Every structure is written in structure tokens, then in C-alpha cells.
Amino acid sequence: MKSQTGGDTEISGFKAPKWILPVLLVFLLGTLAGTASFAKAPPMVVDPSNVSHSQAWLNHQVYDRLVTLPWFGVFDNLAYKVQGNQLTLLGQVVFPLTRSSVVDSVKGLPGVTHIVNDVQQLSFSPFDNQIRRAEYRSIFGYEPLFRYSMGVNPSIHIIVNHSRVTLVGVVDSKADRELAGMRARLVPYVFSVKNDLTVA
């Protein structure tokens, strides 16, 4: 991924373009499923070395700001990495507004002098949106996996980009991990399924 700076997006009163309806439908589906992008054990990437007290505080602040953003859903994923005074934002999001909001949420944090925005903008074509809905139904509509969609922090996130699916998050057992991958592969017209779920 290339390092880019997230731009500001402002929405004011105007006639809605034709593409806004499928985008809003996907967003609302994610909202109904639980809008936070982080699983119960969020897929965060942090510096694994011994961090100082101030570094640990910064990690905590970044996590708190990202997890409370309102625009994330079950179809988004976020991670971050702190290296000294540099904060690198990682992951994938569906909406451009989400990508810019990620950067805005961590601006001005004490100890951060440089922000690298490596958050990937996912496709929200009608075809990918159809796959998102189908994957959601296939995975969470299956009773043994339904519990992973509960609450404001769903444990499984479904990342779709150009008909390729990646599952991220945390499950309780290896059997659930394999079951989620199997259910994801049942959806037609998906080029590939990558199962990055971890077992708690």
C-alpha cells in the first residue's frame, strides 16, 4: 500500500447521486450488525518491543480514538503501528469519509509528529456490495456463527475488494474458524477467500 494523506470530505445539502443508495444500504447493514470495526480482541498491530510508559499511553489513546469512530462497520478493518513519534494507520474501509475520519481522529495526539495513512479504500461497486450482503447472510445466518455478529463489536469482519474476500477478527475455536471460512466460500462469484481469523 502506498502512503497517502486522507482528504477531508464534506457533505452538504444537495440532490443525492444515483450511487448513494447502494452505499447507504451497505452502511446501514453494517450499522445494524454493530458498527465498531474492532472485534472483541481487536486486530491491532502494535510495536512488540518493550515500550516506555509514554509509548504505552499513546497506544491506548490511539486505540480509544479509533474504536469510538461512528463510521466503521462489519465490512471494515483497522490496525495501527506506533514507531517512535510516527503513527502508521493500516487496514481497509469501504467509505472515503471513513478513511479521512481515521486520520482526523488521531491528529493532535501528544507524541505523534507524523501520521502515515496506509488505510486502503475498498471498492463499493454494486457487485462487491452484493457479495458483502451475501457473505453476511451466509456467515452470520448460520446459527453456530450468529453469536459473532452480536453487540457493537462484532468478532468477525468481512473485507471484500474486487470480488476477493478476507475474514479478519477473533473466534473461540479452530472449528469456528474453519466453519466461517467454509461458509464464506459458499457465496457464488467470489474469486478467492482468505481466512485471517485468529483463535482466542
Image (cartoon, grey):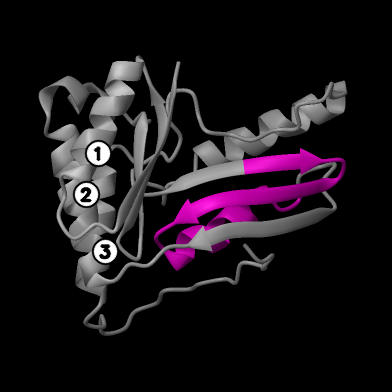
Question: Which residue is more in the foreground, 190 or 144?
Answer: 190
How far, Cα to Cα, is label 1 from label 2?
6 Å
Query: The N terminus is located in which quarter?
Result: bottom right
Question: Which residue is more in the foreground, 190 or 12?
Answer: 190
For residue 121, side relative to residue 141 (left or right) = right
User: Residue 156: x, y in percent?
Assistant: 34, 33
> Circle 2 sits on which residue?
29
Mark 1 or mark 3: name the one nearer the start of the chain. Answer: 1
Numbered mark located on residue 145 in the image: none
Instruction: Please tell me how crowded label 2 is: few (under 14), some (14-19), or many (20+) other residues with Cα within 10 Å.
Output: some
- Residue type at tag 2: Leu
> Circle 3 sits on which residue?
128
Is residue 85 visible in the rendered image? The answer is yes
Instruction: Please tell me how crowded label 3 is: few (under 14), some (14-19), or many (20+) other residues with Cα within 10 Å.
Output: many
For residue 175, side relative to residue 80 (left or right) = left
How far, Cα to Cα, is label 2 from label 3?
14 Å
Residue drawn at 63 percent across, 58 percent down: 118
Helix, strand or loop for disc 2: helix
> Circle 1 sits on which residue?
33
Quadrant for residue 57, please give it.
Answer: top right
Helix, strand or loop for disc 1: helix
Instruction: Please tell me how crowded label 1 is: few (under 14), some (14-19), or many (20+) other residues with Cα within 10 Å.
Output: many
Where are the magenta residues, as a range?
80-108
Tell me whether circle 1 and circle 2 mark residues in contact (CB < 8 Å). yes
- Residue type at tag 3: Asp
For residue 136, side relative to residue 154 (left or right) = left
Mark 2 or mark 3: name the one nearer the start of the chain. Answer: 2
